[in-house]
């Protein structure tokens, strides 16, 4: 994938990030007495959109959500935390990783209940894609690993799109 020029400079991984906390209420629960998946998807989309806006400094729209994995259920009164951060900047698009946890209020222990990658696109006032003004650089080995994976995932998405599968 060709390197893209980002006119405003570079942000480090983590600068563009968002944390959202929710306590599950009756309106968040489905007929099986668990967190309604669609509600969580809305919260994830929100957090990812905020992280992406902090990366590009403007407006974004969600182009795609993939690898949305519901790993564990959550229940009424559970405390849910979503951590979202930008893992890759393409030309006009960004990948955002969003991890969702339930936190045990007594012990502070976190259980991951969802893991997702979203593609957010930086858009101008007319909603047309525009180059993300800020590039992204990883500074730790863990971030490098995540960003390498993100580049690979971006290539796979492009291939899938090009081939229509
Ligand atoms: C997202 C949108 C702006 C993309 O517009 P487009 O004309 O398809 O633009 P492009 O083909 O140039 O794609 C723009 C970027 O998004 C990426 N992209 C677009 N669709 C994608 C998809 N389905 N999956 C992954 N990436 C995608 C492209 O790879 C490109 O990335 P790059 O510039 O970093 O290389 C447009 O499809 C749109 O407005 N969709 C509706 C979005 C929306 O309403 N979201 C809210 C849903 S509730």
Image (cartoon, rainbow, N blue to C red):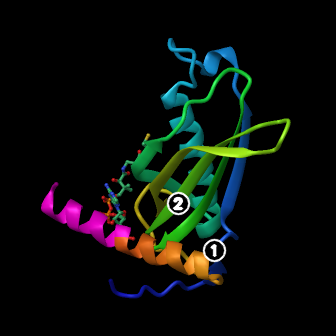
Q: Nearer the viewer, residue 135 or 144?
A: 144
Q: Earlier in the sequence, mark 1 or mark 2?
A: 1
Magenta segment range?
A: 153-165
- Residue at 52 percent across and 60 percent down: it is 96
Disc marking residue 96: 2
Q: Is residue 85 left or right of residue 36?
A: right
Tell me where residue 9 sits by quadrant: bottom right
Q: Residue at x 46, y 55 (%)?
A: 117
| Callout 1 secondary element | loop
Quadrant of the snapshot with the N terminus = bottom left
Q: Where does the image place residue 62, in percent across and percent down from the top left?
A: 45, 51
Q: Position of residue 19 (x, y in %)?
A: 71, 51
| Tag 2 secondary structure | strand
Judged from the image, the quadrant occupied by ligand 1 is bottom left
Q: Position of residue 155 (x, y in %)?
A: 31, 72
Mark 2 burial class by Cα count in 10 Å: few <14, some 14-19, many 20+? many
Q: Are marks 1 and 2 in contact (CB under 8 Å)?
A: no
Name the residue beneath numbered marker 1.
13
Residue 145: where, in percent of width, then height? 51, 77
Distance Cα–Cα, label 1 vs label 2: 11 Å
User: Is residue 157 part of the magenta span, yes or no?
Assistant: yes
**Dominant secondary-structure state across the stretch colored magenta:** helix
Q: Is residue 156 visible?
A: yes
């Amino acid at each position: 994938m060709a390197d893209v020029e980002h006119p405003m400079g570079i942000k480090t991984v983590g600068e563009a990030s968002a944390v959202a906390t929710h306590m599950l209420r009756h309106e968040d629960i489905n007929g099986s007495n668990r967190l309604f998946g669609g509600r969580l998807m809305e919260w994830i989309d929100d957090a990812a959109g905020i992280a992406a806006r902090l990366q590009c400094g403007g407006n974004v729209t969600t182009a795609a959500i993939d690898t949305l994995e519901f790993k564990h259920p959550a229940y009424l009164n559970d405390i849910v935390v979503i951590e979202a951060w930008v893992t890759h900047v393409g030309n006009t698009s960004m990948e955002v990783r969003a991890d969702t946890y339930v936190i045990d209020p007594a012990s502070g222990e976190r259980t991951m209940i969802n893991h997702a990658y979203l593609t957010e696109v930086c858009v101008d006032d007319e909603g047309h894609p525009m180059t993300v003004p800020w590039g992204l650089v990883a500074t730790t080995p863990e971030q490098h690993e995540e960003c390498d994976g993100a580049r690979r995932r971006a290539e796979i998405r492009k291939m899938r799109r090009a081939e229509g599968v």
